[in-house]
Image (cartoon, grey):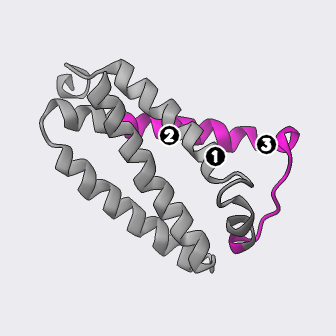
Amino acid sequence: MAELIQGVSWAGVISGAIGAFLLGWLWYSPKLFGPKWAEGVGVQMGDANEMPKAAMFFQLLGLFLVSWLVGVTAVSDALLTIILAVVGFSVMGYAGGLFRKNSAYARGVDAGYWVASVVVMVICQGIF
């Protein structure tokens, strides 16, 4: 259990999770990939008053956990492990999009977000 907390940069973990969350806000916004992504997954984009609060909470929780994983791999000099994990999770997410019959564009946007999020997390670990 100690390997999960000992030496982990909590500033890096928290800033990585928040940075990745903010990246997602921009990534899926009308300014970037949002409208075409929403069309590809069969949802309608709403305004800020219609934000799915539960989904956003679990997104932030999940990002925190992944950022923590990045922190643990950074401490143990195993950052290549996180690359393997991100590739694996991105492929699984892509496969899930295929099952849901999401468009190729939407699947690519989702996979790209995961890769970009982990890059943010790794950078935050390097800074803090």
Within the magenta stretch, is there residue 87? no
Image coordinates of residue 103 in percent, x first then y, are 63, 78
The kind of residue tagged 1 is Leu
Q: Is residue 1 left or right of residue 120?
A: left
The quadrant of the image that shows the C terminus is top left
Q: CA distance from mark 3 to mark 2?
A: 18 Å
Q: Main secondary structure of the magenta part?
A: helix
Provide the residue designation for mark 1.
26
Which residue appears at 63% of the width and 46% of the height? 26
* Residues at marks 1 and 2 touching, judged by CB atoms closer than 8 Å: no
Which element is circle 3 on?
loop
Q: Which residue is mark 3?
A: 51
> Helix, strand or loop at disc 1?
helix
Q: Range of the magenta residues?
A: 40-67
Pair 3/2: label in front: 2
Residue 71 is situated, as x and y percent measured from the top left of the image, at: 28, 32
Question: Could you tell me which residue is drawn at 40 percent across and 55 percent down?
Answer: 115
Measure the C-alpha gap from mark 1 to mark 2.
10 Å
Amino acid found under the numbered disc labelled 2: Ala
Residue drawn 35% across the image and 20% down it: 10
Looking at the rendering, in which quadrant would you find the N terminus? Answer: top left
Label 1 vs label 2, nearer the camera = 1
Q: Are marks 3 and 1 in contact (CB under 8 Å)?
A: no
- Is 28 located above or below residue 108 in the figure? above
Q: Residue 50, position in %: x, y? A: 85, 44
For label 2, the residue is 20
Q: Dot 2: what SS?
A: helix
